[in-house]
Image: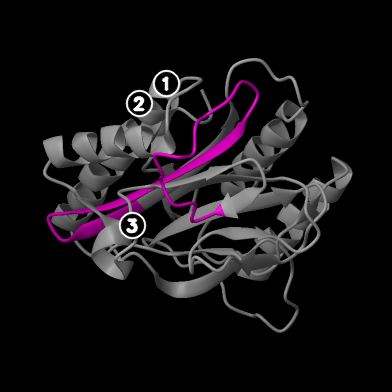
Amino acid sequence: MSITKESELEGMKAVSEVVGITLKRMREYAKVGMSTKELDEYGGDILKSYGAKSAPYETYQFPGYTCISVNQEIAHGIPSVNNLLKEGDLINIDVSAELNGFWSDNGGSFVLGKDIYNHQPLVNASKDILHKAISRIKGGVKIADIGSLIETEAKKHGFRVIKNLAGHGVGRSLHEKPEDILNYRVKSNKERFRQNTTVAIETFVSTNSTIALELNDGWTLVGNRGGYVCQHEHTILITNNAPVILTESNGIFA
């Protein structure tokens, strides 16, 4: 979305704060023995309290207010009363919403309780790579160069990236141009980030897989080679200097 007036920036700030707070509070609320359905309904209640609408539900009729993916699920995990959280689970929560005609998106992976399966290095890598990628984004920077940075940094940590999932423009709808802010370099992509636009930047850092595959439920994504994937995501405003992290309220970088 191109920001052309102050009211548009204020609208993006408002919805971004809501999705950020919702993600942070859901992460804090998650407990061993809780179902992902209960966690999702908690997040849905927060969104409703601000007058916001779940973006995946509104846009795609997703069967939940938020996407909650556990362990070997990469993304789009369906909240379920039968999916009970356990000590050491690798959990990803993705929260996106609409408020007063503006849309924002954020997400993050974390370990529930004790890190008994050693997922934390993957979580840290994903988070650190997102931070580094965002710090390099400004008007005029090639999208492909940020993809290259993400993949190069993942390899430095001993990990891979998922190549068919991407960040995207966001603002007046959930997915806008640029539609493919990928986690690797596409040499043919000459597109550049534009000043005063809002985009969702996200990492998909993997232990084994490079491609996300959809399960028979029509939503849940898993890796083509198994293993685990961490995702972290912020909605940002691009400037000619350091970008403004609109979803800073989620506390990912705290």
View extreme (front): residue = 82
Q: Is residue 213 above or below residue 9?
A: below
Q: Is residue 253 above or below residue 147?
A: above
Contact flag, marks 1 and 3 (Cβ < 8 Å): no
Q: Which residues are magenta?
A: 75-104
Residue shown at the point (49%, 56%) measured from the top left: 76
Q: Is residue 29 above or below residue 189?
A: above
Is residue 103 rendered magenta in the image?
yes
Q: Which residue position is annotated with label 1?
A: 28
Q: Which residue position is annotated with label 2?
A: 25
User: Which residue occupies the foreground of this view, 215 or 98?
Assistant: 215
180 left or right of 1 in image? right
* Residue 144 x %, y %: 68, 69
**The disc labelled 1 sits on which kind of residue?**
Glu
Residue shown at the point (74%, 20%) measured from the top left: 116
User: Which residue occupies the foreground of this view, 27 or 148?
Assistant: 27
Alpha carbons under labels 1 and 3: distance apart: 23 Å
Residue shown at the point (22%, 34%) measured from the top left: 46
User: Which residue occupies the foreground of this view, 48 or 182?
Assistant: 48
Q: Is residue 104 above or below residue 92?
A: below
Residue 63, disc = 3
Asked if residue 177 can be seen in this view, the reply is yes
* Residue 70 x %, y %: 57, 41
Is the N terminus in the top left, top right, bottom left or bottom right quadrant?
Answer: bottom left
Residue shown at the point (28%, 59%) measured from the top left: 57
**The disc labelled 2 sits on which kind of residue?**
Arg
Asked if residue 137 can be seen in this view, the reply is no
